[in-house]
Image (spheres, rainbow, N blue to C red):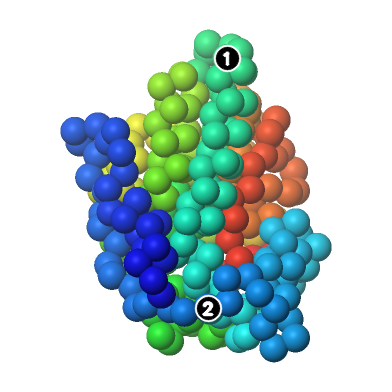
Amino acid sequence: MEVIGFLFLATLLSTSHAEPHDVVNPIRQLRPRSGSGGRRVEGLDCLSWRLAVETNNLQGWKLVPQSCEEYVGNYMLGKQYRHDCEVVADSAIEYAKSFELAGDGKDVWVFDIDETTLSNLPYYARSDVQFGAIAYNDTRFNEWVAEGTAPAVPPLHRLYKTVLSLGFKTVFISGTADRFTDIRILNLNQAGYYNWEKLILKGADDHGTSVDYKSKKRTELVKQGYRIVGNIGDQWSDLIGTNVGNRTFKVPDPMYYIG
């Protein structure tokens, strides 16, 4: 991949305007990739495939088509993914600034973690993963999570800091197993995330689909008196179901599908 393909990596290396205590983990150097730039590859229009994924018209898919691996890699490492995330963050910030908080500390913004607040690009760029073109390996991914080195997604870090400054409480709801609670807290702190109201991870008694799990946890928040004003995630399963909030925002992610 040409040097321009690493623009997003440079952004991850140093988020701008970080507070003195914000330590953003560096993303390790990724192997160069050449690719289609969105052109039709072996009979498959990869840009149209990605559009179908992001609009949830293509559901239940297991792998990125191997003919689109290079396209997805270029997208995730290139300027378009960064710009797309910036547009999402800007839209969410505009909405957050327009919302009149009740002032009782019960207005919350729900954040997903993986591919929303933290990036797993160093993992998905590995040769044995190939940006979702190789079958998901739970053991290997959990080993990566246990490293606790995932960097922030800069535009989403900016959104997080903005909603805190506006007076919202923040809640993380993630499908990460709760045995990783300590390492997730450390990773979030190192990536510049602080002062959340709740960090909700998946326990042994949490069953069903991701939609079921996240709906249940949001419902519990509402029963505790919280009002979900905003909700942001990279999967549609983060944003559908019950008690999704006043507004939802979808972060692009063509690397995997969670139903």
Q: Can residue 214 be spotted in the picture?
A: no
- The quarter of the picture where residue 90 lies is top right
Tell me what residue is drawn at x 73 percent, y 49 percent: 240
Q: CA distance from mark 1 to mark 2?
A: 46 Å
Find disc 2 in the rendering and name its residue.
35
- Tally of numbered discs: 2
Using the image, determine if residue 221 lies above or below residue 177: above
Tell me what residue is drawn at x 25 percent, y 57 percent: 26
**Furthest residue in direction left, as rendered:** 20
Amino acid on which the number 1 mark rests in the picture: Leu
Using the image, determine if residue 145 lies above or below residue 251: below
Q: Quadrant of the C terminus?
A: bottom right
Q: Can residue 158 be spotted in the picture?
A: yes
Considering depth in this image, is 104 or 156 the residue closer to the camera? 156
Element on which disc 2 rests: loop
Find disc 1 in the rendering and name its residue.
101
Q: Residues within 10 Å of mark 1 (few under 14, many from 20)?
A: some
Q: Horizontal and vertical percent for residue 246? A: 70, 30
Q: Horizontal and vertical percent for residue 181? A: 36, 55
Which of disc 2 and disc 1 is earlier in sequence?
2
Tell me what residue is drawn at x 34 percent, y 40 percent: 193
Q: Horizontal and vertical percent for residue 235? A: 63, 57
Considering depth in this image, is 124 or 240 the residue closer to the camera? 124
